[in-house]
Amino acid sequence: MKMFNSMQQLMRAHLGMVLWALIVGLSFPAVGLMSEGLPPLLLTALRFAIAVLAIWPLVWHQHDRWPSLPGLVLYSLMGACLAGFFSAMFWAAHRATALSMATLYVSVPLLAYCLGRGLGVEPRAGRVMSILAVGAVGALGLAWAEAVGQSGELQFGAGEVGFFIGCLVSALYPVLSKWGLDKGWLSQYAAPRTFWSLLTGTLLIGSLGLLWETPGALATMTFTDTLLLVYLGVFSSGMTFWLLQRATAVLTPAAVTAYSYLVPFVSMLLLFMDQPQRVGWHWLPGSLLVLLAIVLLLRRDAIKCIRGGSS
């Protein structure tokens, strides 16, 4: 019975991260529909604020909805990770090519594994490194396939350095969450962990937006922009971070972040539905490698669960 319950939790975590990748992949077209010229950091802060409001009803009924002092400090660090990533992404957007940024983002699962090893939340496992390498090669293949026929080129300058730092703090977010769970400093439930990390992230990103951007530019938002922002806040921010936090309690940080390899695969499927003539055989190798990496992760965790239940 214990092994059966563990398998159920494991499958829910993996399926939840598949849903996470689907929602994140679908959010990019939604962002593209918003009006140009809106301040990105302040928009992100508003998205997070909407997500916080959407999650609060789930938090209110939890007995450990209020964090301890160590927990609050850790949530602040997790919020700083969110602020650091989005700030680096927006700063690098006009200083680095899309291909360079997509290539650098492939490093996040490997960074999460290395950081997790340092904090003791990742086991020593060469097999994990191999699986992450397969997924990374596949994601790089999809990035190159998307760049075919476009003007983007791979380079490494100040913009790429800034974005790589953003990738580093992005990888640190699930590692800190897992470490806090192991220490008993964070709530055992996903909703409070999502709420408090997003709340601190909202305050930090909003503060940066007020310093660097023009708040008055938000007055140009249309009714459609507002609807899109609510959708992105509830689903692309609130639900995705809740799914990520739920999976973090069961999976390792590297396994959680490895699902970012699926996001360009979802983008490829959307491109195929919208412009099938642009999707050729050059998309196939990367797609197969990404799917293979996810299957290998599922198989590895299932084997670990069975062996743990039988011991």
Image (cartoon, grey):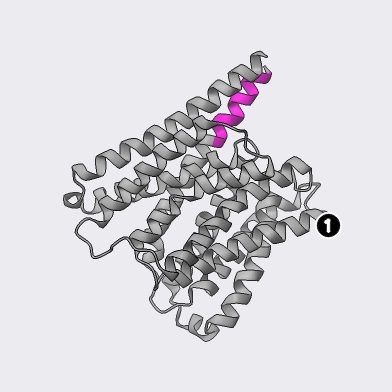
Query: For this rendering, which residue is in front, 136 or 63?
Result: 136
Query: For this rendering, which residue is in front, 8 or 181?
Result: 181
Q: What residue is shown at x 64% (from left), y 70% (from top)?
A: 204
At numbered mark 1, what does the secondary structure look like: helix, strand or loop?
A: helix
Give residue 50's quadrant in the image. bottom right
Residue 6 lies in the magenta stretch: yes
Residue 10 shows in the view: yes
Q: Main secondary structure of the magenta part?
A: helix
Q: What residue is shown at x 43% (from left), y 30% (from top)?
A: 295
The residue to which callout 1 is attached is 69
Toward the top, the furthest residue is 310
Compared with 127, 71 (above or below) is below
Toward the left, the furthest residue is 277
What range is drawn magenta here? 2-13
Please tell me how crowded label 1 is: few (under 14), some (14-19), or many (20+) other residues with Cα within 10 Å: few
Compared with 75, 179 (above or below) is above
Quadrant containing the C terminus in the rendered view: top right
Quadrant containing the N terminus in the rendered view: top right
Q: What residue is shown at x 54% (from left), y 83% (from top)?
A: 215
Disc 1 residue type? Leu
Give coordinates of residue 262: x percent, y percent.
41, 44
Is 296 left, or right, of 56 in this rendering?
left
Residue 195 lies in the magenta stretch: no
Is 226 left, or right, of 13 in this rendering?
left
Compared with 71, 9 (above or below) is above
Q: What residue is shown at x 55% (from left), y 81% (from top)?
A: 212
Give coordinates of residue 58: x percent, y percent.
68, 50
Give coordinates of residue 139: x percent, y percent.
37, 46
